[in-house]
Image: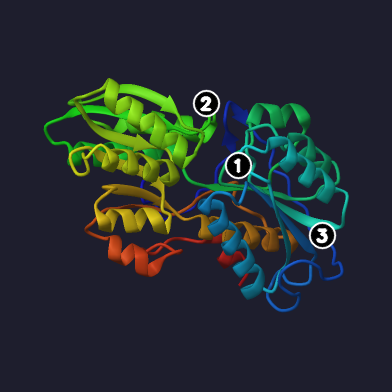
């Protein structure tokens, strides 16, 4: 995603098709979960449930922090449940299904795959419960077929984020060179979009010579990067679809004694990745802000429960972090070092 700080009001289009935008005002219920009711435009209108990806990944730990902080500062009644791991599709679906049978008036969901939460979303849509989809979009055609409705989507334009990374790699390799791509889970929509964008962003002199999947995992990426360097002795750079894999790649490069001679760019914006930029193991991070995405998700639910009309889709803030601005990024974390637009905050005034 380019560092665009504005939101968009568009017909929500995710994946192969369009989603019907569903929204309903809801009544009040007894307090439960994080935070407390009272105060603010959307307070005391009901309980919110958030179902996110596994907390075995620091990105989603930070997202959870944003959700909980907004629950506290916005006086919202929020319960957060997470999948056991970033690959636990069935377990995450079970959590949503279990919560769907309880008295929650709005849901924030971050699905592991495009389809694993469709059944639960459809169950909630049948009761006109608003759903706020954050970070990873549900599959549009599958949602339409199941009458699963989304009130708003909040997340990174992953093709654009990858394009930013590709352009940055071009600056790091002004004379060109061979690079390898390390994606997440094979077939994952988010990973695929970032890899696609990277290839759009690189100049003609930068050539992608190998692409592998490393399951979003640091150790797996370390192993894959080690193998790639042996197979590609002229390699000049790696692009990783998330920071955890980027850090694994950086370790593999260090083990091979090639730190600095092989460039590393990743996507996410974790503190460890910023520290790796300062240390020289990682050259650039296309930073998105899971803390902000999580907080916006709760704000969107508050606005929905207050009867506000939500924008169909909102771009989360993104910026490229290098050694030139990493200190500013670290000092501002987990929020962006630059200003950004938050349309949901405006709805709550």
Q: Quadrant of the N terminus?
A: top left
Q: Secondary structure at mark 3?
A: loop
Mark 3 highlights which residue? 26
Work out whether residue 273 or residue 249 is closer to the camera in this orientation and state it: 249
In percent of the image, x 27 and y 29: which residue is there? 179
| Badge 2 or badge 1: first in the primary sequence | 1
Q: CA distance from mark 2 to mark 3?
A: 39 Å
Which label lies toward us, 3 or 1?
1
Dot 1, how many residues are within 10 Å of its Cα: few (below 14), some (14-19), or many (20+)?
A: many
Mark 2 highlights which residue? 186
Where is 55 relative to 158, above or below? below
- In-image side of 55 versus 180 (left or right): right
Residue 302, visible in the rendered structure: yes
Q: Quadrant of the C terminus?
A: bottom right
- Residues tagged 2 and 3 counted as in contact (Cβ below 8 A): no
In percent of the image, x 71 and y 79: which residue is there? 39
Quarter residue 260 falls in: top left
Q: CA distance from mark 2 to mark 1?
A: 13 Å
Where is 305 relative to 264, above or below? below
- In-image side of 329 versus 135 (left or right): left
- Residues tagged 2 and 1 counted as in contact (Cβ below 8 A): no
Mark 1 highlights which residue? 86
Q: Secondary structure at mark 2?
A: loop
Where is 337 relative to 15, above or below? below
Q: Secondary structure at mark 1?
A: loop
């Amino acid at each position: 995603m380019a560092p665009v700080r504005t939101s968009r009001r568009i017909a929500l289009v995710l994946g192969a098709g369009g989603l019907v935008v569903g929204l309903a005002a809801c009544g009040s219920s007894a307090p439960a979960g994080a935070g407390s009711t009272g105060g603010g435009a959307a307070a005391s209108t009901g309980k919110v449930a958030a179902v996110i990806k596994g907390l075995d990944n620091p990105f989603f730990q930070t997202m959870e922090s944003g959700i909980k902080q907004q629950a506290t500062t916005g006086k919202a009644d929020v319960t957060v449940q997470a999948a056991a791991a970033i690959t636990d599709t069935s377990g995450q679906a079970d959590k949503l299904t279990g919560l769907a049978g309880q008295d929650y008036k709005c849901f924030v969901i971050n699905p592991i795959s495009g389809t694993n939460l469709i059944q639960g979303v459809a169950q909630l849509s049948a009761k006109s419960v608003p759903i706020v989809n954050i970070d990873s979009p549900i599959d549009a055609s599958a949602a339409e077929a199941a009458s699963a409705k989304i009130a708003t989507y909040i997340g990174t334009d992953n093709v654009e984020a990858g394009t930013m990374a590709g352009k940055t790699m071009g600056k790091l390799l002004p004379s060109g060179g061979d690079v390898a791509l390390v994606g997440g889970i094979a077939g994952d929509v988010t990973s695929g979009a970032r890899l696609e964008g990277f290839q759009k962003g690189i100049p003609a002199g930068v050539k992608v010579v190998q692409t592998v999947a490393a399951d979003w995992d640091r150790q797996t990426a370390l192993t894959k990067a080690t193998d790639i360097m042996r197979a590609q002795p002229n390699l000049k750079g790696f692009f990783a679809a998330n920071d955890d894999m980027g850090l694994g790649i950086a370790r593999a490069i260090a083990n091979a004694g090639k730190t600095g001679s092989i460039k590393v760019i990743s996507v996410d914006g974790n503190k460890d990745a910023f520290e790796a930029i300062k240390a020289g193991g990682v050259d650039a991070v296309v930073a998105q802000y899971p803390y902000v995405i999580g907080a916006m998700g709760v704000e969107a639910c508050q606005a929905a429960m207050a009867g506000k009309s939500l924008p169909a889709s909102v771009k989360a803030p993104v910026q490229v972090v290098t050694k030139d601005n990493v200190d500013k990024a670290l000092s501002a974390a987990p929020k962006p070092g630059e200003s950004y637009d938050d349309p949901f905050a405006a709805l709550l005034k």
